[in-house]
Amino acid sequence: MKISLYPDNYRTLFAIFETIYPINDLLKEDIIKNSEVLEVPKKTNLLKSGDKSNAIYFIISGTARIYYLDKEGKESNTWFLFENDLLISVYSFYTGNSSFEYIETLDDCKLISLKRELLNYLYNKYMEFNFVGRKLTEYYYMRNELQANELRMLSAKERYERLLERNPALFQRVSLSHIASYLGISRETLSRIRNR
């Protein structure tokens, strides 16, 4: 079967996998059989701090964020994810330990959800899927490393400029308060930088 013969919700996901490594029809059918499509309203917590993450999501449509609360209860955003991104609490999902993060939808979202035990089943059954998973993990690890280095090494103005250059659409889809938190600055500082 060709990708176009699969349900609409899976076409883009399979196309992304295919850019990494060819995956066979049996694997595609197993992914469909072992996952589910969810329609999730805006402002839904998919995961709360203290819960254990047992699912990885592919965003078909919508926006989500990952954040944590410091000791004073102040939110710090660590990720914004959009269509065609994977949504996951990395530490909790891979260790099985309680999460220190929250995952929240910022828009109404349509997601493909795959449970950890089913992901591992697919990894064990299909070596090509193992390869795809490793390459995706490398990609998200590099994105995380880039973000961490920018927070450590760049000024607030430079962090803002990099984010604007890399993802201008973010500023139309995410509140300035959330963006300021992501950049590690106050909303007022972000406003001053933008007004320059």
Image: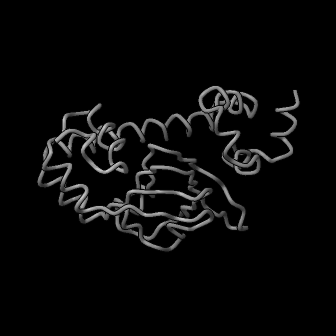
Outermost residue toward the front in this view: 5
Out of 34 and 88, give the one closest to the viewer: 34
**Left or right: 168 as drawn, with respect to 26:** right
**Left or right: 129 as drawn, with respect to 165:** left
Quadrant into which the C terminus falls: top right
For the point 86% across and 45% down, which residue is it? 188
Out of 151 and 131, give the one closest to the viewer: 131
x and y percentages locating residue 148 in the rendered image: 56, 40
- Give the image quarter of residue 52: bottom left
Outermost residue toward the bottom in this view: 50
x and y percentages locating residue 75 in the rendered image: 68, 60
Quadrant into which the N terminus falls: top left
**Left or right: 147 as drawn, with respect to 38:** right
For the point 20% across and 45% down, which residue is it? 129
For the point 35% across and 67% down, which residue is it? 96
Compared to 194, does 118 lie above or below?
below
Out of 155 and 48, give the one closest to the viewer: 48
Compared to 93, does 131 lie above or below?
above
Compared to 62, does 36 lie above or below?
below
**Left or right: 145 as drawn, with respect to 189:** left
For the point 60% across and 61% down, which residue is it? 68
x and y percentages locating residue 171 in the rendered image: 70, 39
- Give the image quarter of residue 25: top left
Give the color scheme: rainbow, by chain, secondary structure or one colour.
one colour
x and y percentages locating residue 59 in the rendered image: 45, 51
Compared to 127, does 160 lie above or below?
above
